Image: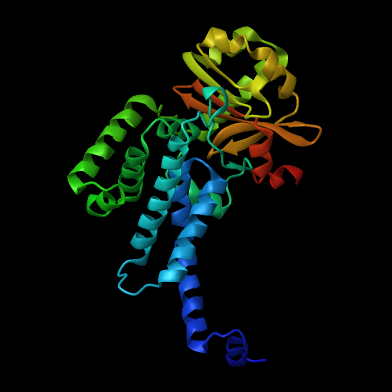
């Protein structure tokens, strides 16, 4: 059966089908950026994919009549969807993060480097430390900062999304920027040096060498461990090098089964237990010292990550 008869059998005119295919092609051209926007807004790959899918549904229902800049239009749609999700989290009036500690969902890839899709997702070097700080912003502040500072969306377009004037949207982004600049550490730019520090952490953990651990930890290092609802005993927030070293027994248990990986584009570790991922560890290295360690050990969220490269 040719395309014309197939379309007719489905109650669809051939021209309508061609329009839909053209629309789908245009949408796929924007998918990478839309996913990047949603990931920065939500800190979750699965929720980001849901937000992008919702944008496609809205586009397929409304079409592009009157839309001059499809990429910009879709970006604002994804922004609205993510804003609604963030507001819903707050409206539940419950702590969505077990024990008050939350590690955003990491992008994990092989040490040789992310694949092209992951590379596009992490184009702004969005590390876990930055995502943690973004979690502290109000939904409107986060949207204004992400859209304007990371994706150059003008405040004239951001204002209507958050029901504010462009000037008020500018103030939202400004407040968020001050929080980010004053809180989020700026990692070292040399990947080889970062890897040396992470490898030293792994070696010291395996050997139970507390002095070696202290030597590579910043005095004010922060450790976040997120075990989720199914592993609440893992969840903790630890501050200070001495306190972090006191947790070394935890590291030594998993260090023997740890494999190097990239976590949000920076050197990190994936620990396995009976062949399954037990934790993902992200490190933020500044001036040759570890200033943040973020551990995701939530079995449910780990199971949702794409870690198939570990089997290769």
Report x, y in % for residue 164: 23, 46
Identify the colour scheme used: rainbow
Side of 108 relative to 275 (left or right): left
- Image point (53%, 40%), residue name: 265
In this orientation, does residue 40 appear?
no
Report x, y in % for residue 74: 39, 60
Q: Quadrant of residue 136?
A: top left
Q: Quadrant of residue 201?
A: top right
Side of 277 relative to 129 (left or right): right
Which residue is situated farthest in the front direction here? 92
- Image point (34%, 60%), residue name: 72
Of 225 and 90, nearer the camera is 90
When the figure is inspected, residue 144 is found, relative to residue 186, above or below; the finding is below
Which residue is situated farthest in the left direction here? 167
When the figure is inspected, residue 51 is found, relative to residue 97, above or below; the finding is below
When the figure is inspected, residue 52 is found, relative to residue 103, above or below; the finding is below
Report x, y in % for residue 108: 60, 41
When the figure is inspected, residue 180 is found, relative to residue 10, above or below; the finding is above
- Image point (48%, 87%), residue name: 15
Of 62 and 188, nearer the camera is 62
Of 169 and 22, nearer the camera is 169
In this orientation, does residue 155 appear?
yes
Question: What number of labels is visible?
Answer: 0
- Image point (39%, 28%), residue name: 184
Q: Which quarter of the image is occupied by the N terminus?
A: bottom right
Q: Quadrant of residue 198?
A: top right
Report x, y in % for residue 21: 51, 77
């Amino acid at each position: 059966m040719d395309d014309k008869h197939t379309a007719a059998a489905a109650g669809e005119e051939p021209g309508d089908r061609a329009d839909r295919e053209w629309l789908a092609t245009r949408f796929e051209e924007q998918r990478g950026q839309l996913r990047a926007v949603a990931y920065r807004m939500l800190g979750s790959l699965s929720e980001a994919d849901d937000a992008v899918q919702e944008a496609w549904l809205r586009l397929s229902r409304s079409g592009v009549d009157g839309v001059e800049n499809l990429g910009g239009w879709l970006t604002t749609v994804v922004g609205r969807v993510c804003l609604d999700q963030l507001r819903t989290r707050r409206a539940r009036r419950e702590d969505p993060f077990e024990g008050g500690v939350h590690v955003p969902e990491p992008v994990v890839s092989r040490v040789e480097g992310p694949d092209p899709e992951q590379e596009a997702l992490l184009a702004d070097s969005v590390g876990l430390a930055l995502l943690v700080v973004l979690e502290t912003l109000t939904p409107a502040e986060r949207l204004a900062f992400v859209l304007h500072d990371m994706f150059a969306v003008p405040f004239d377009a951001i204002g209507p999304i958050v029901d504010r004037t462009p000037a008020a949207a500018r103030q939202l982004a400004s407040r968020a920027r001050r929080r980010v600049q004053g809180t989020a550490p700026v990692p070292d730019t040399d990947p080889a040096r970062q890897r040396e520090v992470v490898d030293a952490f792994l070696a010291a953990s395996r050997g139970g060498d507390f002095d070696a651990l202290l030597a590579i930890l910043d005095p004010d290092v922060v450790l976040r461990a997120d075990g989720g609802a199914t592993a609440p005993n893992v969840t903790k927030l630890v501050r200070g090098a001495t306190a972090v070293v006191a947790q070394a027994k935890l590291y030594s248990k998993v260090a023997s089964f740890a494999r190097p990986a990239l976590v949000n584009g920076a050197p990190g570790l994936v620990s396995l237990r009976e062949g399954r991922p037990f934790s993902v560890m992200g490190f933020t290295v500044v001036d040759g010292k570890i200033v943040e360690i973020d551990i995701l050990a939530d079995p449910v969220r780990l199971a949702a990550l794409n870690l198939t490269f570990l089997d290769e």
